[in-house]
Amino acid sequence: MVGRPKIGIIGFSDGEPAVHEQLKDVVQKQVDSIVAEVCRLDAIDIVVASKLVNSVSTAKSMALELVAQGVDGVIFSYGVFSFPNFSVVAAQFLKLPCLLMANLNPDWPGMVSMLASGGALNQLGIHHLRAAGDIRDAEVRNKVISFAKCARVVGRLQGSTYGLVGGRSLGMYSATVSMQDWQQKFGIDIEHIDQSEIIRLAEEVPVAQVDKAFAWLTDNLKEIKYDGVQLTPDKLKRQIRHYEATKRLVKDKSLDFVGVKCHYELSRHHCTQCISAAFMNDPYDWDGPKEPMAFACEADSDAGLTMQILKLLTDDPVLFMDVRHWDAERGIMVFCNCGSESTYYATGTDDYRANLAKTTLYPALSIYSGGGAHVNLMTHAGKATIARLCRKNGAYRMVMFDAEFVELPPEVMKETTEEWPHVFAKLPFDYRKFIDKFDANHCHAVYGSHIEDISKICGMMGIELDILSD
């Protein structure tokens, strides 16, 4: 799993030395109350700055101290009035998400300090969040928890590596990104890897590992529809080898998420990468439970980044979908992708037996002459958040909305491409709004409603929001 958020906390005091000496116990009490409640929750790792801030020099040194300890974000605690320039200095050296907190205490002007400091940060364009009140109150506590989760996403993106295997697929501009933009905006490095590495490493996979995987799939899948041409046992074993090779690349190059081109070099001349797409994103494979790895089909890099954000936020597998069709008769948006989706979504649980019992391997379509299997399943019903990073004139915006996945009779999948995985979704608005506003053929989803948290994450990273609703 991704691990718990690691959050720092700094207490801010008065800049006059004599006044600081008089009030430091009040400041410390506020810090201690926040720390005690966070520790009680046992969901966040808290790191307390070794000194209270009462000068520019301590603002700098405490910020650098917390950065050195690898925190994801920092709470600024105000128990009394603190000179706002201290918060500005700390924030500029931190360059991390910040949450400003003040108690509702009429005895001391902590609220005054929070607003003065927040105003100073906003004048300089330094994004931050605020929470006013006693942390023992549910509303304030939930703000702290949400801040920590969102800061963790931003913190884990910084310094991460995306494995771009292959180049642009099928001429899609919306799938390609600038290495420089990603490094500057998100702190993500892009490691470009040739698809030939998958082919090379596939030959090094031990036969025993391939046989183990093949037996596991054979024993647990609902059906494998061998046709003797596109899908044979040998071609399925080749797909297994490609998956194992991709896992090897992830390990050897310390990749955090990946995108693989597939079409057409691999799909027409070797095999489709559908098994890789399914089980990289899954929380298990034939070796047992594992952390899901965001894997984007067709080397769609903005897809991969969207998926990584959703995965870091929820710790769950993330859907990769094509926007295929609007079913006017049923009032359903049909998402159906040639690659695959995590088999987790067959039931929405980590039970691989239950999920694979609802999953069928079909022969790859003839246009993918390398052969192999497509992974078919119908996504389990449930409320979900659909999201996608889109760009206009180089500027990112997150398009997102809540939807409800529904299940339909299996024969409905024959109306599009039966061999591929399907998501059927009811939209909470006129589908034409989606068609008009969406700037990609791929989109992504996780169960649950996460609009508020994703909005905070986007605010922390300077990404514009585009929330679709009635």
Image (tube, rainbow, N blue to C red):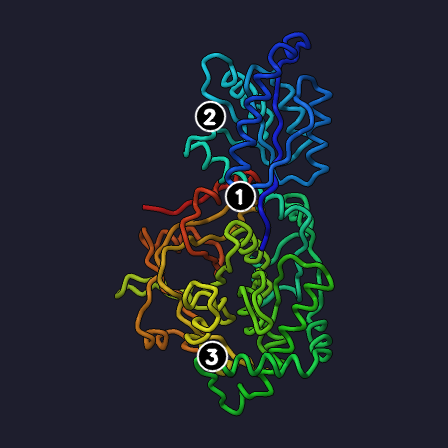
Q: Is residue 409 left or right of residue 113?
A: left
Seen in the picture, residue 39 relative to 266 is either above or below; the reply is: above
How crowded pointer 2 is (Cα within 10 Å; few <14, some 14-19, many 20+) is rated as some
Q: Nearer the viewer, mark 2 or mark 1?
A: 1
Q: Residue furthest left?
A: 329
Q: Residue at x 55, y 37 (%)?
A: 39
Q: Is residue 371 visible?
A: no
Secondary structure beneath label 3? loop
Q: Nearer the viewer, mark 1 or mark 3?
A: 1
Secondary structure beneath label 1? loop
Q: Is residue 38 visible?
A: yes
Counting from the top left corner in percent of width and height, residue 282 is at: 53, 65
> Which badge, 1 or 3, is on the more N-terminal residue?
1
Q: Amino acid at mark 1?
A: Ala
Q: Which of 254/188 is in front?
A: 254
> Which badge, 2 or 3, is on the more N-terminal residue?
2
Q: Amino acid at mark 2?
A: Ala
Counting from the top left corner in percent of width and height, residue 190 is at: 69, 55
Seen in the picture, residue 82 relative to 240 is either above or below; the reply is: above
Counting from the top left corner in percent of width and height, residue 136 is at: 45, 30
How crowded pointer 1 is (Cα within 10 Å; few <14, some 14-19, many 20+) is rated as some
Q: Residue furthest top?
A: 18
Seen in the picture, residue 442 relative to 457 is either above or below; the reply is: below
Seen in the picture, residue 253 relative to 44 is either above or below; the reply is: below
Residue that badge 3 annotates: 221
**Disc on res. 43:** 1
How crowded pointer 3 is (Cα within 10 Å; few <14, some 14-19, many 20+) is rated as some
